[in-house]
Structure formats: structure tokens, C-alpha cells
Image (cartoon, rainbow, N blue to C red):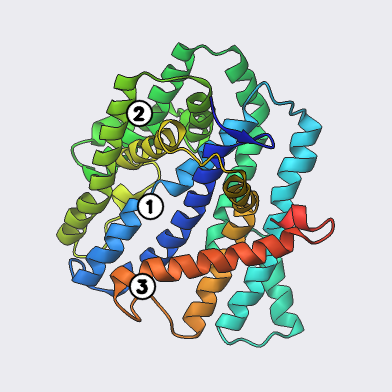
Amino acid sequence: MAQKLDGRVAYADLLRSFATLAVIVLHLAGSQLGSVSVGSPAWDVFNLYDGLVRWCVPVFVMLSGMFLLDPKRSLPLPKLLFHNALRIFISLLFWGGVYALAELWEAGKPLNWDSVQSALLGVLRGNTHYHLWFLFMILGLYLITPVLRAFVRGAGRGDFLWLFLLCFLFASLLPTAFRLWPNATAVLRVWYDRLSLQAVLGYAGFYVAGYYLKEFTIGRLTEAVIYILGALGAFAAVWGTRALSLRAGGLDDTLYGYFAPNVVCFAVAVFVLFRYVLGVSEERSRRQSLNTAARVSFGMYLVHDLFLMLLRHFGITTLSFAPALAVPVLAAAVFFASFLVSWLLSKLPFLGRWLT
């Protein structure tokens, strides 16, 4: 039975907090991968950190599906559209505007009416800061949530597993094979394109998997296999990327992709690990602290890149001192600064709940 506090699932809160930290590590480590030589000590450090947190975005999607697809939770269409989806849309516009202005400042451009107007119009056209892509994707998942909720209400375990097989095959395994071995898979690629199985492409597989892994208990043997595949997936993300990049003479991020088979296995293993192994202290004060961090994790994701921009402005990067130390130290600093700002924003009357 999952531990709960005030109706929240403890392992999900813990996982959400760790995923937020992992995103920050990802952005810090990845920011310098292209500025150092492949195979150099610094590159190896950045590749190690980057590869070991590739699970974070799929897990965020799984956490959303874990709750929003649960038929036991009431989610009428008006609530989905005018609460859940509207919150994402408002956050997208607000933070898109904030980052548009921040980019002008970072580039040293004047903040006059014309530049501000151009930047804000760009947001309305969908030209937003790089990390806000996640909000567009989540909005898309919200739009198909009623259909997926109908599926999970009537689906048995076999139906779920068939869906996951299709998703893994057509959204993960085959696209990765096409990228790694384009000539050898040319004929298979023709069949793949003509089948046009759009329904199992994209992030819907992760979304449904979050609900499935919460609702259905897995056996010990299956759990062990998942951990083994997850460990192999992490190994492939780090050492496979290194091998491919050395061969290419530059970063080859094929095994970094969120749909790469190794990352899929890695993300599922992390979710299962938190679900079945990593407990949370029963001490109420600790669980309340965790609850607070998880509640503002969305705002932390949105605001954290402002602090990365500030670090760049002051010339502080993960190359400013030993990379092995710089990545975790700067990640911790950005994490806590983002938490503080997000928590303060969440206290704003009315607006707080829409922006964090």
C-alpha cells in the first residue's frame, strides 16, 4: 500500500522532486557537451551526468498519467479543460513572455516597445524558450486524456501489455534502429512509414504506463528483470553514447533520446524502484517537507532556467571549476533557488496556483 499524506502518494512526491533535480542536472551537464572534445575527461563527466538522468522527462509524463488516467478520480471534461489544461496554457503564455524578455536581456538587446512586442508576439506564435516544449506536449496529452481514460476503464492487463508492445516497437525500437543502421533497415522503414501507426507514437505510452505501474502489481521476477534492463539502459546511455560519439567525431545523441529503448527501460526501472523499494520516512515533518517540494515542482521546472541564465551572465558554468564537482554543486544551488522562488510565487493570491 502506498504511503499517503493529505491524500498525496508519498513515493510519487519523492519521485517528482528527484525528477525536478534530474532536469536541472540534465540542462547543466548538457550545456557544455558541445564545447569540449569528445572523449576528454570533462566530456566524459558531462556525458556521465547527462546519461544518468535521461529518465527524468519520461517519468514526469508517467507521474501525470498515474493520476489523471485513474478512473477512480473524477475528471469531467470541463474540469480537465478549464482547470488542468487552462493552467498549463496560462503558464505557457506567462513564462513564455518572461523568458522572451529574459532572452532579450541576456543578448544585450534594448528592452524597448518594439523589441518587447516582437518577443511577446513570438510567444503567441509558439516560439518559446527551449524547455517550455514540455508544456506543449502535456497540453496535447490532456486533449486525448478522455479517450485514454475510457481505454483504461475497460482494459485488462493483456490490453495494456499489447499497447505497450506497440508503443515500444513503433515509437522506440524501430526509430532507433533506423537511425543507427539506416541502410540495413531501409526496406523495413518503408513498411513502417506506410503503416502510419500514429496512435502509438509520442508520449501516450509513458502516460498510460504511469497509471498501469501504479494500479497493477508486478511480480518479483518481473521487477528484477526491469531493474536489469534499466541498468543496461543507463549503461547504454553513457557508454553507448560515448562509443557512438567517438565514431562520429562529435556528439551522437541517439541513445539519449527519450524514446530510445535504453532510456525507456531506464525510466520504467526508476519508476518501479521508487514504487516498490525507496520508501519515505513515516516522520510527518519530513513527509510534509517533501509534499511542499512536490507541490511546487512544476513551478521549479518553469523557473529554473532563469537561474541558469543568471549563472551564464556572471560567467559561471560547469567548466568554471572541476566538472565532477561543478555539476552537482550548481544543480543543488539552482534547485534550492528555484524551490524558494516557486514557493513564494505559489503564495500569491489567486495567481499562485496558475503559475506554479
Q: Is residue 275 above or below residue 300?
A: above
**Are the residues flagged by discs 1 and 2 in contact, CB closer than 8 Å?**
no
Q: Secondary structure at mark 1?
A: loop
Question: Of 137 and 210, which appears nearest the observer?
Answer: 210
Residue that numbered label 2 is attached to: 169
Which disc number belongs to residue 326? 3
Q: Which mark is residue 252?
A: none
Image position of 117 (left or right of 262):
right
Asked if labels 3 and 2 touch by Cβ distance under 8 angstroms, the answer is no
Q: Is residue 88 visible?
A: yes
Which of marks 3 and 1 precedes in the sequence?
Answer: 1
Per the model, the C-alpha gap separating discs 1 and 3 is: 16 Å
Query: Who comes first in sequence, dot 2 or dot 3?
Result: 2
- Frontmost of labels 2 and 3 is 3
In the image, what residue type sits under mark 3?
A: Ala
> Does residue 295 appear to the left or right of 198 in the view shown?
right
Q: Nearer the viewer, residue 112 or 309?
A: 309
Which element type, helix, strand or loop, lies under badge 3?
helix
Q: CA distance from mark 1 to mark 2?
A: 23 Å
Residue at (59, 76) in percent of width and height: 103
> Can you name the residue that lies furthest to the right here?
349
Image spot of residue 243 (x, y percent): 17, 54
Identified by mark 1, the residue type is Val
What residue is shown with label 1? Answer: 53
Question: Measured from the top left, where is residue 298 in percent x and y?
Answer: 62, 53
- Relative to 14, is 252 on the left or the right? left
Disc 2, SS: helix
Q: Which of these two is toward me, 184 or 320?
A: 320
